[in-house]
């Protein structure tokens, strides 16, 4: 990391961990991890370790959900034309796919519409309602968007089109006036799980449709696709999200898959592999996202909808198209990132502030969110990347823990043409002439709530773990805790002193590879993107304290434990 992190050890109750270890028959270190995650009750901890579909909550507990599904089933029965309106990211595309597929299986006359990032803009627009109405659509159901679509809802009402909104973004004080609004974040919604991704909310609709149509056997196939959107949207992996992600990954590994998903996995080199959250986050999701970022999201949507074996050739071509768009996306974001970093490092008006606000004429709007996330990684500050196009600037924002980006944008509302999103990620639009004014205003807000320590990354550790404690049993228990992500971070330990007995060697010009020894046991270790720290390890190979995660790798049929170093001192 460019900024040295502060090491913090998470507190836990030793007595609770011992009691849980005895009750569940798990190792003390795994019991400690469960207690740190707030899983003190043995039954709750057991359900966490062994998720099942029956842990999914009753969808009817979501406000307006029954109203929404009853209207959908009435439209199916009457053969009314239905349109599923999605969004151009992985969450929106997978939401569109599962709801459209479920309605098709129920016999609906259904199509879909996903806006194109550069021509249609974000979210539910009044113009789209006009377009769908002209095509004979009688019922529109949004997924992963629409919660702030009051104008679109008014237009639907004027045209006599019924509108159902399903979303998971933060609502305005007033909800759009439409047939039904399904969103666990509604202020009047008592649904216990507020953390669902957009595809999680769409899955609740599908779950209710399956139940009301006596087709509950269909549900697992939809959970499998919902897992992709849930993991890609980086929502907390607890509660229903954990059930969806864990079981979905198992089904994605096991197969069999429809022809479209199969072609996507083949293109990503994942055929026959044990699929985990890394594969989805860094191999599958970027390919699906590349469609919406670089050209049209319909490439990915058509691919995931492809179910007929006769479409194998078309599916292969679509997967190859995603591959080339993803390659183009990588080149584009690398170029813009280099320019953005140069702005931060060369201009004190940008680089010395708590929130990094960079802008460039004609920067590709499809990748500015990725660039913002990479600036956060590089400088550990909230980052806003703006693409100016004549008089208008479009922005993408990413934040750090402890800084509410949506609240920051709300404080700048008079300057912005539009904005929306979450605490950690958001989007905005403003006049290009007001970029400097916006930079001052968002930083004035940040200066009231961010101190110097907030701008240093914290390495949260789950306590000590010596090499001798890393047994086959412990590694298997760590695997049971997966998938990891927000709300369930990968277990991260510290130990020392250890001795570097082989290396460090620089790998691919960027990474450090080595072997380390403690109390007679030698383990392989790697630290990503740490080549510049090689001299520090060479200067003092003995007496190193390390912060690390435990990985299980396979090479030529041999399974072995490898440590991923997060930091050393």
Image (cartoon, grey):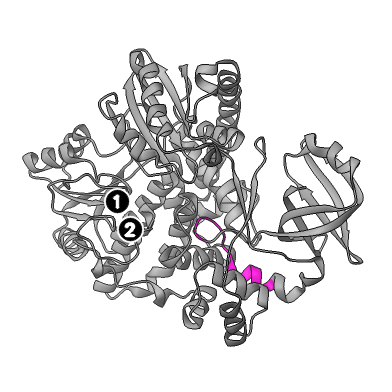
The image quarter in which residue 463 lies? bottom right
Q: Is residue 508 visible?
A: no
Q: Nearer the viewer, residue 193 or 275?
A: 193
Residue 10 lies, in percent from the top left, at 59, 61
Where residue 206 sits, quadrant-wise, is bottom left
- The answer to whether 132 is drawn above or below residue 101 in the figure is above
Q: Earlier in the sequence, mark 1 or mark 2?
A: 1
The answer to whether the residue labelled 1 contacts the one labelled 2, judged by CB atoms less than 8 Å apart, is yes
Residue range corresponding to the magenta coloring = 476-487
Residue 167: numbered disc = 1
Residue under numbered circle 2: 201
x and y percentages locating residue 310 in the rendered image = 48, 53
Between residues 335 and 473, which one lies in front from this camera angle?
Answer: 473
**In the picture shown, does residue 215 fall above or below 515?**
below
Q: Position of residue 106 (x, y in %)?
A: 27, 64
In-image side of 204 versus 75 (left or right) = right
Mark 1 is surrounded, within 10 Å at the Cα level, by few (under 14), some (14 to 19) or many (20 or more) other residues, namely: many
Q: Is 252 within the magenta?
A: no
Q: Is residue 38 left or right of residue 29?
A: left
Image location (x, y in percent) of residue 209: 27, 67
Q: Is residue 512 visible?
A: yes
**Residue that appears at 48% across and 80% down:** 41
């Amino acid at each position: 990391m460019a900024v040295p992190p502060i090491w913090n050890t998470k507190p836990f109750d030793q007595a609770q961990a011992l009691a849980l270890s005895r009750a569940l028959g798990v190792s003390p270190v795994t019991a400690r991890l469960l207690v740190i995650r707030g899983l003190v009750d043995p039954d709750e901890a057991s359900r966490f370790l062994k998720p099942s579909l029956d842990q999914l909550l009753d969808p009817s507990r979501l406000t307006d959900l029954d109203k929404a599904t009853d209207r959908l089933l009435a439209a199916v029965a009457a053969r009314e034309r239905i349109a599923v309106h999605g969004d151009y990211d992985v969450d929106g595309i997978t939401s569109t796919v599962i709801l459209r597929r479920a309605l098709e299986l129920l016999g609906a006359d259904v199509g879909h519409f996903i806006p194109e990032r550069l021509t249609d803009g974000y979210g539910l627009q009044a113009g789209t309602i006009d377009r769908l109405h002209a095509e004979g659509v009688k019922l529109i159901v949004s997924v992963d968007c629409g919660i702030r679509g009051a104008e679109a809802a008014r237009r639907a009402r004027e045209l006599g089109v019924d509108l159902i909104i399903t979303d998971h973004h933060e609502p305005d004080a007033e909800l759009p006036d439409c047939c039904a609004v399904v969103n666990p974040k509604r202020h009047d919604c008592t649904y216990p799980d507020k953390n669902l991704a957009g595809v999680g909310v769409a899955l609740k609709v599908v779950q209710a449709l399956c139940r009301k149509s006596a087709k509950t056997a269909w549900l697992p196939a939809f959970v499998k696709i919902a897992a992709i959107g849930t993991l890609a949207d980086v929502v907390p992996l607890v509660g229903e999200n954990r059930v969806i992600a864990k079981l979905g990954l198992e089904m994605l590994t096991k197969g069999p898959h429809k022809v479209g998903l199969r072609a996507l996995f083949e293109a990503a080199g994942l055929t026959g592999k044990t699929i985990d959250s890394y594969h989805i986050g860094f191999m599958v999701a970027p390919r699906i996202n590349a469609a919406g970022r670089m050209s049209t999201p319909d490439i990915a949507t058509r691919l995931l909808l492809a179910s007929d074996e006769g479409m194998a050739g078309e599916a292969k071509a679509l997967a190859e198209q995603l591959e080339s768009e993803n390659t183009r996306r990588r080149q584009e974001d690398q170029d813009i990132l280099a320019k953005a970093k140069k702005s931060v490092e060369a201009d004190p008006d940008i680089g010395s502030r708590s929130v990094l606000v960079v802008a460039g004429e004609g920067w590709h709007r499809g990748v500015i969110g990725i660039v913002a996330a990479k600036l956060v990684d590089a400088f550990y500050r909230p980052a806003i990347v703006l693409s100016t196009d004549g008089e208008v600037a479009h922005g993408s924002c990413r934040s750090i823990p402890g800084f509410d980006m949506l609240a920051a944008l709300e404080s700048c509302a008079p300057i912005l043409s539009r904005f929306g999103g979450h605490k950690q990620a958001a989007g905005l639009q403003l006049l290009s002439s007001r970029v400097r004014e916006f930079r001052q205003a968002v930083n004035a807000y940040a200066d009231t709530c961010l101190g110097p320590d907030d701008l240093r990354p914290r390495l949260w550790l789950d306590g000590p773990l010596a090499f001798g404690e890393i047994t086959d049993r412990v590694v298997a228990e760590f695997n049971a805790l997966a998938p990891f992500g927000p709300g369930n971070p990968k277990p991260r330990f510290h130990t020392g002193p250890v001795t570097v007995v082989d290396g460090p060697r620089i790998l691919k010009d960027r990474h450090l590879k080595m072997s380390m020894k403690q109390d007679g046991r030698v383990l392989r270790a790697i630290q990503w993107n740490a080549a510049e720290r090689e001299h520090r390890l060479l200067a003092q190979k003995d007496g190193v304290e390390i912060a690390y995660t435990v990985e299980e790798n396979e090479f030529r049929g041999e399974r072995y434990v490898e440590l991923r170093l997060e930091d050393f001192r």
